[in-house]
Each structure stands twice: as C-alpha cells, then as structure tokens.
Image (tube, rainbow, N blue to C red):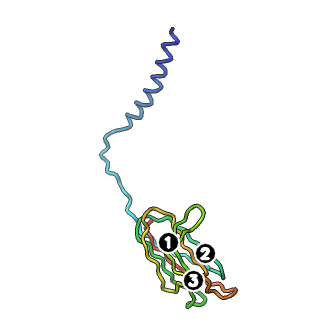
Amino acid sequence: MKGELRAPLLRTLLLVVPLALVVSGCGDSTDPITIPTPVEVTESFSGTVGQGGVSYHVVNAKVGTVTLSMNAIGPDSTATIGMSIGVLNSIACTSVMENPTARVGSQLVGTATGVTTMCVKLYDAGTFAADQTLSYEITLKYIK
C-alpha cells in the first residue's frame, strides 16, 4: 500500500517540477525586440570561362534589389559572355534573369523576393572560338 501511494506522488512531482521551472522562466519582459537592419553588400568575383565552360558564384541574399554588373572581360574586351542570376536548390542553379551576350558594362537588375541562396552563372553561350578562354570580373550588389 505504501508503494502504491509513492508512485503517483513521484509521477506528479516529475511532471509538476519541470513545468514550474519552465513557467517561472516566463515573465513580462519589457525589452524591445531588435530587428537587424538589412545590409547592402557589394561583392566582386573573377574567374575564367573556356569554350563550352561554366563558372558559378553563390551567395545568401535577403529580400531586396539585386544587381549583377559585368566589369571586365579579357583578353578581348569586346567579347561576350553569358551571365545569369538564379536560385540554387540542392542540385541545380535555376536561372531567373539571363543575358547570353553580356559585354563590359552589362547589368542584370532584379528583386529577391525572399531569403534565398542565389547563384551567378558565367558561361559560353556558343560564341567562344575553339580553345578560347576568357577572364571576367563582376560585381554583385544585394541585401545580406
């Protein structure tokens, strides 16, 4: 009989004590919630693309304007390179905006509508000569 009384009491204590600890941690806090201010970031990337080739750059962005600028192409500054901005999922970069004939001074401007992993793709859109490799310099402006 004594063991039967202790078991329910022990179960009750095991439930009530943790609950009391959780509830005692709750209170009427008057501290304001601080929401971080979005920060506009400009990142520079460079690389090379060969005939039939592709180069990727990945960033995490928040809601806001996104601007991709082609700053340099070499050694032939009049050449064109394909460039696009897209969304990276677990297996692919899905283009959202694209310019298959980007030249120095070309831009893609759009809006990120949610927090996302963006990908920038630079590629040969079929305009490179055999064995041609071009270097590029781009800047990507976005909200981080």
Front residue (pair 15, 121): 121
Residue ID at (55%, 91%): 78
> Within 10 angstroms of label 3, few (less than 14), some, or many (20 or more) residues?
many
Pick whichever of labels 2 and 3 is earlier in the sequence: 2
Task: Residue under label 2, please give it.
Answer: 55
SS label for mark 2: strand
The residue positioned 52% from the left and 67% from the top of the image is 87
Q: Eyeballing the image, is 59 above or below 44?
A: above
Front label number (1 vs 2): 1
Disc 2 crowd rating (10 Å Cα; few below 14, some 14-19, many 20+) is some
Amino acid type of the residue that numbered disc 2 sits on in the rendered structure? Ser
Q: Residue at x 62, y 84 (%)?
A: 126
Q: Position of residue 112 (x, y in %)?
A: 44, 67
Q: Amino acid at mark 3?
A: Ile
74 or 117, which is in the foreground? 117
> Of label 1 and label 2, which has the lower sequence position?
2
> Could you say which disc has been placed on residue 96 in the image?
1
3 w.r.t. 108: above or below: above
* Residue at the spot of label 3: 81
How far from the left and from the top, in percent, is residue 68? 48, 77
> At which x and y percent is residue 99?
51, 80
Alpha carbon separation for disc pair 1 and 3: 17 Å
